[in-house]
Image: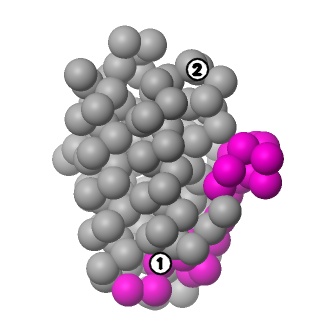
């Protein structure tokens, strides 16, 4: 049974993160609740987690997760391991790289790691670009 839910997740984030990070987390938790094919809530005692999962031919695949300590993880390498179509992975990778000015190529980024929300999301436009990218990847996985 999941320990976390939207209310407890945001309460914990408020205790651990600056207000602007909490605002981003709130918006992305709401987006996840509305758009994910499955929302998976963590069971940890210290840090809460929510995972956005999308339906595909390979089953339910995680696209990103958020934690109550203000981290976001993109599951790009996980999708590579699951043999998701290269075009879908490349699209996801390029959108994350261009939105957040990251290098997510498999050679440079061999493992999915958490990134501080504070380092990535500086404008509301970045939040919107991120949400649109996730919606696009989800739609392609559904095909």
Q: In the image, is residue 99 above or below residue 114?
A: below
Q: In the image, is residue 92 above or below residue 69?
A: above
Residue under the image location 30 percent in, 79 percent down: 125
Residue under the image location 46 percent in, 86 percent down: 122
Query: Of the numbered discs in the image, which one, if any, rests on residue 121?
Result: 1
- Which residue is disc 2 drawn over? 82
Circle nearer the viewer, 2 or 1:
2
Q: Earlier in the sequence, mark 2 or mark 1?
A: 2
Which percent across, then down, holds residue 10?
42, 65
Pick the residue in front: 68 or 28: 28
Q: Classify mark 2: helix, strand or loop.
A: loop
Which percent across, then down, holds residue 112?
69, 46
Q: Main secondary structure of the magenta part?
A: loop
Q: Which residues are magenta?
A: 104-123
Q: Crowding near pointer 1: few (<14 within 10 Å), some, many (20+)?
A: some
Residue 68 visible at all: no
Query: Marks 2 and 1, how far apart in space?
Result: 28 Å
Using residue 42 as the reference point, say whether residue 122 is left or right of it: left
Q: In the image, is residue 95 above or below residue 88?
A: below
Pick the residue in front: 86 or 37: 86
Residue under the image location 72 percent in, 44 percent down: 106
Residue 123 visible at all: yes
Residue under the image location 54 percent in, 64 percent down: 97
Q: Is residue 90 magenta?
A: no
Using residue 112 as the reference point, say whether residue 142 is left or right of it: left
The C terminus sits in image quarter: top left
Using residue 45 as the reference point, say whether residue 133 is left or right of it: left
């Amino acid at each position: 049974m999941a320990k976390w839910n939207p209310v407890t997740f945001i309460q914990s984030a408020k205790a651990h993160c600056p207000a602007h990070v909490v605002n981003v987390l709130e918006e992305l938790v709401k987006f996840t609740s509305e758009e994910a094919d499955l929302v998976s809530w963590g069971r940890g005692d210290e840090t809460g987690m929510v995972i956005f999962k999308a339906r595909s031919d390979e089953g339910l695949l995680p696209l990103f997760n958020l934690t109550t300590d203000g981290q976001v993880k993109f599951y790009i390498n996980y999708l590579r391991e699951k043999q998701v179509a290269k075009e879908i992975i490349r699209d996801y990778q390029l959108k994350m790289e261009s939105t957040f000015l990251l290098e997510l190529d498999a050679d440079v980024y061999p493992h999915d790691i958490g990134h501080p929300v504070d380092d990535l999301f500086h404008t509301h436009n970045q939040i919107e670009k991120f949400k649109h990218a996730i919606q696009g990847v989800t739609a392609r996985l559904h095909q």
